[in-house]
């Protein structure tokens, strides 16, 4: 009997332990919830950061890398040169009926060259901000090179021809200026690297961290210098507006160095850059570290968030561009009213992911070389075409 009673007591204790074990997970969950609530109450901003970082990364990732976007930029830029060459060449023949429509299609496609290059820039900023200075120097060097080439062609050949016709230096300059605007006007207005240099300068002041500047006040002054490219864009827009209205006249040497993109395009990409910067600053202000932000920025979730934010900016400003064009027709002289097409880039933005890693490749150099060779070949063919039709 005593043995049976002991067995019964053992069974009862075992059942009680089982019940306690079953209750333990609920207790643990309740305790965890309480701790989470305490943490959220004590530091709600840091709690949001921790919650964000603890989320599992999403699998969705766009199919295009920033290299693919850059290649598209060169393709669209080459199409712009094809349009220019075609418009020059068609002056010497009776154009076929389909030519105007075909050139218009190519002209629309060529407009997307700048957006492609700028998008590639943003991808680089999100993955690594260390190359901003290098990119600024590269674009500036190319822009200056193109400008010097235009000046060489202008003074060596057109001005030389004008000087041979007229002994008056002013008359020779006017002849060269008129001829250049007729022949090379669109090339001068399409020195996209002047605009890329201006955008890169804005990114440089906004994102770059100089090693010699460590104190807060000097850094604020350095960041505030980003207003300079904005002022340049506004001044260039006003100058172009007055020029197109006939209020002022500008010679080729001045036109060749002015940034020529619309103020709406500048506003779109300045705004996206500011959104990126604010996102980073808010992350750190809420208690995150720079290292944590850099790690999060490399996730697919972050890439998708940036696509959404960029799409909102593009859609809003494209709509503003269209509304201004409809209600204030005069804005057309200031490059406003032709930029609503940017809204068509939104689907493409969701197919792009800056998290797609791209190793250094010979293609980075080849795409530039192929573009230069193709443009040279294009204009050599144009020269031969003009000569054949003149003979």
Image (spheres, rainbow, N blue to C red):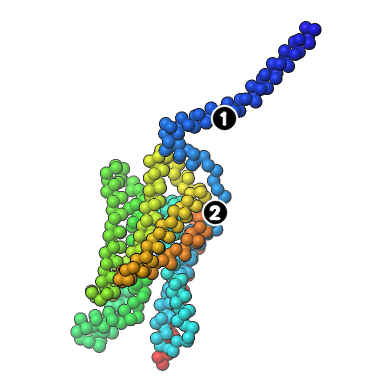
**Residue 382 horizontal/vertical position (percent):** 43, 82
Q: Residue at x 44, y 72 (%)?
A: 108
**Left of 28 or right of it: where is 107?**
left
**Residue 236 horizontal/vertical position (percent):** 28, 66
Dot 1: within a 10 Å radius of its alpha carbon, few (fewer than 14), some, or many (20 or more) residues?
Answer: few
Whole-Å distance between the Cαs marked 2 and 1?
Answer: 34 Å
Residue nearest the observer in this picture, 164 or 62:
62
**Residue 221 horizontal/vertical position (percent):** 27, 48
Q: Where is residue 269, by image quadrant?
A: bottom left
Residue named by callout 2: 61
Position above or below: 32 against 250? above
Q: Which image quarter holds the C terminus? A: bottom left
Position above or below: 383 against 132? below
Can residue 9 be seen from the camera position used here? yes
Instruction: Single out the mark in the foreground, 2 or 1.
Output: 1
Q: Where is residue 143, by image quadrant?
A: bottom left
Callouts 2 and 1 close, C-beta under 8 Å:
no
Residue nearest the observer in this picture, 310 or 153:
310
Can residue 143 be seen from the camera position used here? no
**Which element type, helix, strand or loop, lies under badge 2?**
loop
Q: Residue at x 32, y 53 (%)?
A: 205
**Residue 299 horizontal/vertical position (percent):** 51, 48
Image disc number at residue 29: 1
Return the residue found at the far front. Answer: 327
Position above or below: 42 against 73? above
Position above or below: 46 against 141? above
Residue nearest the observer in this picture, 84 or 265:
265
Q: Which image quarter holds the N terminus? A: top right
**Which element type, helix, strand or loop, lies under badge 1?**
helix
Lower sequence index among marks 2 and 1: 1
Q: Residue at x 46, y 30 (%)?
A: 38
């Amino acid at each position: 009997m005593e043995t049976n009673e002991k067995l019964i007591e053992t069974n009862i204790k075992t059942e009680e332990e089982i019940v306690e074990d079953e209750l333990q997970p609920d207790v643990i969950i309740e305790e965890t919830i309480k701790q989470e609530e305490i943490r959220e109450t004590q530091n709600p901003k840091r709690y949001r950061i921790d919650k964000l970082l603890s989320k599992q990364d999403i699998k969705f990732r766009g199919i295009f890398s920033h290299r693919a976007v850059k290649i598209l930029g060169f393709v669209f830029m080459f199409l712009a040169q094809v349009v220019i060459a075609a418009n020059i060449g068609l002056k010497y023949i009776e154009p076929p009926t389909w030519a105007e429509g075909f050139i218009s299609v190519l002209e629309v496609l060529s407009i997307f060259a700048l957006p492609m290059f700028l998008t590639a820039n943003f991808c680089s900023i999100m993955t690594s901000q260390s190359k901003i200075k290098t990119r600024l120097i590269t674009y500036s060097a190319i822009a200056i090179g193109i400008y010097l080439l235009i000046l060489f062609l202008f003074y060596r050949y057109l001005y030389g021809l004008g000087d041979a016709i007229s002994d008056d230096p002013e008359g020779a300059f006017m002849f060269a200026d008129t001829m250049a605007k007729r022949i090379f006007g669109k090339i001068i207005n399409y020195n996209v690297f002047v605009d890329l240099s201006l955008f890169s300068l804005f990114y440089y002041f906004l994102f770059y961290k100089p090693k010699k500047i460590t104190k807060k006040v000097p850094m604020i002054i350095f960041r505030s210098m980003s207003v300079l490219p904005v002022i340049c864009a506004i001044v260039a827009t006003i100058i172009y507006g007055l020029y197109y209205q006939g209020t002022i006249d500008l010679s080729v040497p001045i036109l060749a160095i002015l940034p020529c993109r619309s103020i709406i395009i500048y506003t779109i990409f300045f705004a996206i850059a500011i959104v990126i910067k604010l996102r980073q600053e808010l992350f750190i202000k809420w208690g995150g570290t720079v290292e944590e932000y850099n790690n999060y920025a490399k996730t697919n979730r972050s890439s998708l968030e940036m696509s959404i934010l960029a799409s909102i900016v593009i859609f809003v400003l494209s709509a503003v561009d269209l509304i201004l064009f409809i209600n204030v027709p005069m804005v057309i002289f200031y490059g406003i009213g032709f930029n609503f097409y940017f809204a068509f880039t939104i689907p493409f933005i969701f197919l792009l992911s800056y998290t797609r890693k791209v190793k250094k490749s010979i293609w980075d150099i080849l795409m530039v070389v192929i573009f230069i060779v193709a443009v040279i070949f294009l204009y050599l063919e144009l020269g031969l075409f003009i000569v054949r039709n003149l003979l």
